[in-house]
Image (cartoon, rainbow, N blue to C red):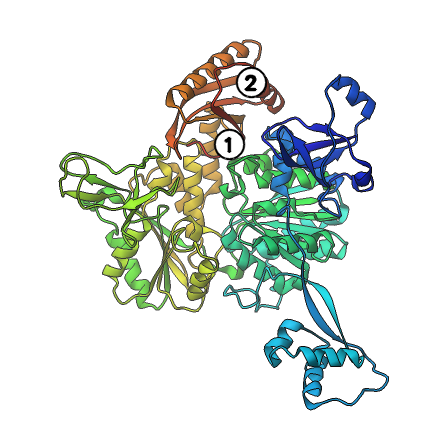
Amino acid sequence: MIEVAVVAPVEKTFYYTVPVEYSSRALLGMRVTVPFGKRSVTGYIIGFPDAQGVSSARGTIKILDIKDIPDSEPAFTPAMLDLYKWIADYYISPLGDVIRTALPVSKGKVKKERVAIILEPAAQEAPMTPKEEKVLSFIRKRGRASMRDINAEFGSPYEIIKRLSTKGLISVVEEEVSRVAYKQGSGVRGQESEVTPALTETQRNAFSEIKAAVEKGGFSPFLLHGVTGSGKTEVYLRVIEEALKMGKGAIVLVPEISLTPQLLSRFRSRFGDKVAALHSALSDGERFDEWRRIKRGEARIVVGARSAIFAPMDDLGVLVVDEEHDHSYKQEESPRYNARDLAVVRGKMVKGVVILGSATPSMESYHNAKTGKFNYLNLPDRVEERPMPQIAVVDMKDTGKRQIFSSQMTESLNRCIGDKKQALLFLNRRGFSTFLICSDCGFTFGCPNCSISLIYHQGEGLLRCHYCDYEQKAFPVCPACKGTNVGHLGLGTEKVEDEVQKAFPDSRVARMDRDTVSRKGSHERILKRMEEGDLDILIGTQMVTKGHDYPNITMVGVISADISLNLPDFRAAERTFQLLTQVAGRAGRGDAPGKVIIQTFNPDHYSIVAARSHDLEGFYREEATFREELGYPPFSRLISIRLRGNSEARTASAANSLGELARDEMKAWKGLTILGPSKATIYKIRGKYRWHMLVKGKDSGKLHSFVRKLLSLSNEGSGFRGVELQMDVDPLNML
């Protein structure tokens, strides 16, 4: 008898019997194919319950046989199963979904190729033809040569290879080949530097404290708060070096794939082939091979985006979460885990050291440091005594007219270009204009699948939805009144690029957003141009704010600081402070000082005031007062219950029914608060109507119990058919 977590949207597990032919291979962690209703599904063995007890509990219900065990070895260890179970329980997600998410492609295959190897020493080499001598020499110089390389050099010399093999000079064998997930010379800096830089005093202090924790052993979480350019990465490298000496491995998380190549390059320059990469930009084959390298212990350091937290690393000693504040660590589909928080959980399970690094720590992490849950380390200064950039805030209300660039921004750009330096312009919205509107009748071009306006992309002549990817041609005539006064309103990075090229026609300009980096390698190519001085001005969305280190950038311009500030989200101020501080930190990282221009209509808002003076503590005090008064994290916990359905009326009815159930059930619970249900800010996405309800409280256990009870009650009712209920524990997306 085995217990199986199936890959299906069900929270409970199922029991199966094992035919005799599979009994020796039915191990914990094995992937199995099992009957499930009228179909077969994939599942994973998670336990071996008492067969008599299960049969007794199930009564007369027949327990079916498994159909297949397709793999030769388990997909995960008991230790990883403990992590999967924790995730399933905490994030209220089916265990099978968690395992599916954690593992690489389920049907990954080992790649093999035929290789010719020299059989040395040969007792007596038989006479050879000139062609045989050439081929043998080619192989001998390399010690071994793939048939692919031999064919490329000599044009498929099958008969020659056969004769050399017959004479006992070579042997042709089949070997496993690792698909390359990282290529030298990929266009990112870092691999060229082999010299270990000297540490500043604050770096030494931080390193010494973390090193002591690694040597002592046991769970130890750190918040490494370092200003941009303070050398947090060097501290990571030194700590991991110490862990390797002790036989411990390390996982390093970065928030986005775009950051992986640069950081990976630095780690490879220090640790060589001990480093593996794991992220979604890898092909299935590359990811499968890297996973196997880690599992076999060939790679002792894993660098990757959020899914790298599941790397099958034995003897894990250090977990690093770089830019720990970044919302990209949160997965927005089931299981809706936060990789930063999982790093802490996994670190506790393996009794390891966890380092959360950021110039702008999240409110939750900073609060944990303040209250003693995390050890706090501070790097207040940049390396090599480089000054922080000067930040000027421009009140756009004083400009007197609508314009993209203030006079201060234009002057700074001119000075920067004149000095042969580079500039970075930031606007967290892509496209040319936010929407098209008819001036005659007021008609706006909206998405038929989502309750938002279509974004105009001038380069393609398209209107596009950034939620469902619906697109249509941009028509010059209004479809409602047939008028021709169709105008553009709003602003995106494409429009900024257009205006920059008009204002600075001789400058070299590039744009970096999701539209321009969709192809593999395009992000690296843009950054390589920055590195080589082939660009004067780079325009981008939030991806330009993260981790990039280019010493020739001396000017940073924020086109509109108000976009994130005006979102209907209690985290709007925090998000604004983080974005402004991070993008400002791209300036002045070389020998020349940096200058930052922030354009805003809210210059007195505390998030902008704090960003201007690099004042995290000041921002935290203001924001904490607001959060505590309203009972928001970090002073409470949240669970969002989202309802989605194809029918507007049925979804609304289900939401109201859920609200009634919640209010009735709440009478028996204390310390919890319900907000909603209400229509979501974006009411319709991909044809689905959306409602949500927030449950908040200080006691996480009580909060989870209440929500599970609410789900159980909803499953018993008929008013929820055709409506999907999604649980989001510790939600970050409030839209």
377 vs 342, nearest the viewer: 342
Q: Nearer the viewer, mark 1 or mark 2?
A: 2
Residue 58 place in picture, x, y as percent: 74, 19
Q: How many marks?
A: 2
Residue 269 place in picture, x, y as percent: 61, 65
650 vs 310, nearest the viewer: 650
- The residue where tag 2 is placed is 715
Which amino acid type corresponds to the residue marked 2 in the rendered image? Asn
Please tell me how crowded label 1 is: few (under 14), some (14-19), or many (20+) other residues with Cα within 10 Å. Answer: some
Which structural element holds mark 2?
helix
Q: Is residue 707 visible?
A: yes
Q: Is residue 593 above or below residue 331?
A: below
Q: Is residue 715 above or below residue 5?
A: above
Residue pictured at 67% horizontal, 77% vertical? 158
Residue 554 place in picture, x, y as percent: 39, 60
Spatial separation of the CA atoms under disc 1 and disc 2: 23 Å
Residue pictured at 69% horizontal, 68% vertical? 114
**The N terminus - image quarter:** top right
Q: Is residue 170 above or below residue 291?
A: below
Q: Is residue 201 visible?
A: no
Please tell me how crowded label 2 is: few (under 14), some (14-19), or many (20+) other residues with Cα within 10 Å. Answer: few
443 vs 646, nearest the viewer: 646
- The residue where tag 1 is placed is 731
